[in-house]
Amino acid sequence: MSAPVGSRALRALAPWWEVVLLGVLTVGAYGLVMYSFGVLIGPIREATGWPIGGLSLAYTVSSLLGGLAAPFTGWLLDRFGPRPVIVGSLVLGSGGLLAAASAPSLPLFVLAWGTGGGIVSAGLYYSVSMAVTARLFVEKRLRAFAILTFIGGLASVVFFPIAGLLVEQLSWRTALRVLVALMAIHCLPAALLVRRGRSAAGGRVAFWSGMGEALRLPEARWMIGMFALAGLSVSAVQVHQVPAMTAGGISLAAATTIASVKGLLSLPGRAGTEAVVRRAGVPVALGAAYAAMAAGTLTLAFGGIGAALAFMTVTGLAFGTISPLQGLFAANVYGERRLGTLMGVQTFLVSLAGAGGPVVLGIAVDATGGYRAGIIASALLAGAALLMLVTRPRAEPQPAADDSDDPSSGLSGAPTSSSFASK
């Protein structure tokens, strides 16, 4: 008699247990700070009268502070390993978000959410979990990234409906406190059990000496600009997709359901990343994802249930591939030794450029009384990222890494992007 499907799946995932825990951590971190904020913003405005632009500023501050702190948390990861980073970020970030739940005024809410969300994004987002995963599975990196981002893709699927249910049944302040507890439940297993992932250089990794390496290669500078444009577009849409749909005449329950299904549709894209990369390479796959994001986002500008369903389907299928593909792209460019620090520097620079997306879109809503202009601008930004990808500088061809199992890996030696340029 064959073993049940569930038990076979568990045995298949057993060698990857650290990646699984990091994926669950990702669900909690992104689920609260990114996805739940988009559900909370409407009820907070209704309960307090605080403007959408001001509330969006809280998300922008968290993105900026997270970016500023990311190089430091990446350095801590390189030197001490994941536990101090994950535990410290969870404790301090949860404290800030709980303070936001009790904030009596908009400035205090912005300060508390910005601080708590910034700490969570600096220490619990993909800039940390991907760096740990890349070191844990050097020879199986493509498969490991697929597992990490597939599980992480459940963040919207899990937190959108939960956040929507909580704000309908409870006050937004109580709902936020419950969501912080749920984030902690998701993050604690990785915080306690994942210990490996420190740089091979260990204590010899110096913080300041590695800060300029992210900008040394022309292809790295171009890549960071491309990621910044894509991040500007994606963050604005992620934060405002639910209120944009409700402004188009869709109920909050329907909008959160559509957003949740959109997250669910990202899972096939994440699951298929490995096969697509082996066949077409990272640049082709990433370009297709950017193009789909631009086209799908544009449909949201028309309002109504049909446009929302088109947005859900097109961007949902594309969104799941962007995180793993950008992570693989960056890992190949930077190399392994200071991967945590360099991905932190990249996160800092991309956050500086992209954090303005939600607040600018929010201000546009307050100024125009609708979401159409801001949504169209977000679609154009995704198209600009595609243009940068197509016109990126190519590195001179170099010998490929000896890694027949994982064609995306090129980190065992000097940093190179030649494997991308040739595919």
Image: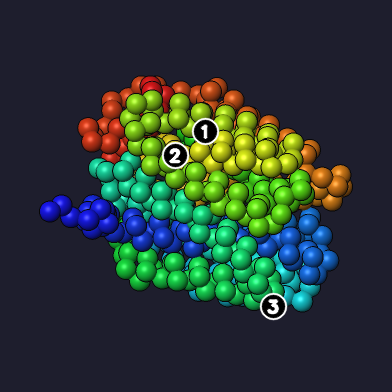
Identify the element where label 2 is drawn.
helix
Q: In this view, does 254 lie to the left or right of 4?
A: right
Q: Answer with mark 3 or mark 2, whichever residue precedes in sequence.
A: 3
Q: Answer with mark 1 or mark 3, whichever residue precedes in sequence.
A: 3
Q: Which residue is drawn at 44% across and 39% down?
A: 269
| Disc 1 from disc 3: Cα separation | 39 Å
The C terminus sits in image quarter: top left
| Disc 1 from disc 2: Cα separation | 9 Å
- For disc 1, the neighbor class at 10 Å (few under 14, some 14 to 19, many from 20) is many
Residue at the spot of label 1: 289
Between residues 171 and 231, which one lies in front from this camera angle? Answer: 171
Residue at the spot of label 3: 102
Residue 301's quadrant in the figure? top right
Residue 356, percent across and down? 70, 48
Q: Can residue 415 be seen in this view?
A: no
Q: Which amino acid does label 3 sit on?
A: Ser
Question: Residue placed farthest to the front in the image?
Answer: 1
Q: What residue type is labelled 1?
A: Ala
In the image, residue 62 sits, relative to residue 222, either above or below, namely below
Identify the element where label 3 is drawn.
loop
Residue 61, percent across and down? 68, 58
Count the labels in the image: 3
Which mark, residue 262?
Answer: none
Residue at the spot of label 2: 269
Residue 277's quadrant in the figure? top left
Residue 220, percent across and down? 49, 35
Q: Answer with mark 1 or mark 2, whichever residue precedes in sequence.
A: 2
Check if mark 1's residue and mark 2's residue have beta carbons within 8 Å: yes
Residue 192, percent across and down? 35, 71
